[in-house]
Amino acid sequence: MTNQRRLSRMLDPVMRGLLVTILLWGAGAGVLRAFAVPPERCPAVTADEAMAAALAAAGWITRSQGADGSYVYEYNVAKDANVPGYNEVRHAGVTMSLYQLAAAGQPGFLKAADTGLGRMIANLAFFDDRAILKEPGGQTYKTGSSALMLAGLAQRRIATDDREYDELMRQLGRFLVSMQEPVGAILAAWDPSTRAPVPGERSKYYTGETFWALALLERVLPGEGWDVPALAAADYLALHRDEAEGLDYPPWADQWAAYGLAEVAAWPGPPRLRAAHVEYARSLAGRFGLLVRVESRRTNSDFSRLVRGPMARAAGMGTWGEGLGSLWTLASTDPRIADLRGPIGDRAVCTAGMLVARQYESDDEAGAAGADGAWFRDSLTRMDDQQHAISALLLAATILDERGEH
């Protein structure tokens, strides 16, 4: 046997082992990609498509609006039936989103929003110089309802320049300020039997909602002192909230806080956001971006559901889009976060693309036409699915319009 043949036989096992190793690594990488790192899917979307989807969602909200101003709370498309229940915080949020449409130059749903506002006005309680939105049948009144009612009224003021409700906005603002603790947090509920806040009870939503509402109030009624409690709430959100309230995986993805930060950045005069607020905004951008990246890799297949969980409902996706769109607005104003403007905008647009792609469209099949414009998961949609999607799509349309993607 020649030396060359001996060497060949010696190398054959080595080469076979190396080949097997390469194949195993390749297969492992494929499995890893399938299970852990699938490709992102961001459907293409234009500004016109985003706006059309927002208008279709508003159409779903208003088609079945009751004479008292209420909206369909939850709907099962498989059964073509409404699901009982109601929630005043969500009613205020839906009405606010219709006013956002008007403020964005789409006044077609202003009448429906005013009808929804009429329902809230009928449910107001007045104590001293404050106005509080009641929860019919509830033993306490939720702060979030009043905060989102105030935010909606501010959006109405921006859209119409109508001063009819200026004093009501002040009364709601005074109530919200009365719910603020010294640390800046907002208490969650007011007890009409004691005529006082329920001590120690907080909500992870309501401080952010109140922050934004008060920041808007400073915008539409400047110079009345609403900036002070708004900034106190911003301090709490940026510095203390996640730890104080035991929220896992900080920062908690709070789109209301993002709205508020963008609003403060737009106040006239010297910048009012401190370094801690900007750092908080940057961390929120990372949190929202991660959520969108994960969602963009999900599909409705059984395999995807098993490995990566179910696709998010529109209410959740919408909040990410709201947060990202608001942070994009902030990055357009504050140079301290301007370096993230492009990536933030990309994620907001990705969210809008997924929302447009997943919105329900029927061919007027029996029982299905009434579902047009809504978003469903497991055959169910709820009013806030449309609310948050509308708000996210409006913000994304602004980004796309600036980019010339009509």
Image (tube, rainbow, N blue to C red):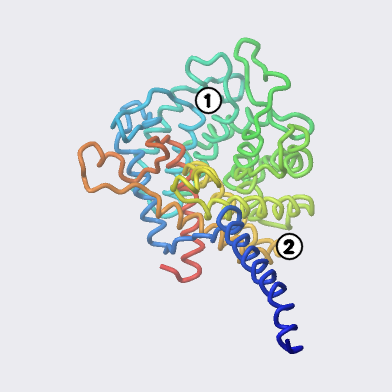
Disc on res. 336:
2
Kindly report which numbered mark, 2 or 1, lies closer to the viewer in this rendering.
Answer: 2
Residue drawn at (64%, 39%) of the image: 208
State the image quarter where residue 237 is shown: top right
Q: Residue at x 45, y 45 (%)?
A: 302
Report if residue 156 is visible in the image.
Answer: no
* Residue 177 position in % (x across, y down): 68, 31
Q: Residues within 10 Å of mark 2 (few under 14, many from 20)?
A: some
Q: Residue at x 64, y 26 (%)?
A: 188
Up-down relation of residue 225 to residue 128 (above or below): below
Q: Amino acid at mark 1?
A: Leu
Secondary structure of the residue carrying tag 2 is helix
Closer to the camera, 184 or 327?
327
Q: Position of residue 199 (x, y in %)?
A: 72, 19
State how far apart marks 2 and 1 are (Cα): 38 Å
* Residue 141 in view: yes
Is label 1 in a helix, a strand or a loop? strand
What residue sits 54% from the left and 29% below the top?
Answer: 145
Whether tag 2 and tag 1 are in contact, CB under 8 A, the answer is: no
**What kind of residue is marked 2?**
Arg
x, y percent for residue 337: 70, 61
Query: In the image, is 307 to the left or to the right of 59?
Result: right
Q: x, y percentage for residue 135?
A: 51, 21
Q: Nearer the viewer, residue 188 or 84?
A: 84
User: Would you name the residue on which mark 1 appears?
Assistant: 133
Q: How many marks?
A: 2
The one nearer the camera, 312 or 54, is 312
The C terminus: image quadrant: bottom left
Question: In which quarter of the view is residue 224 placed?
Answer: top right
Q: Is residue 77 above or below residue 100?
A: above
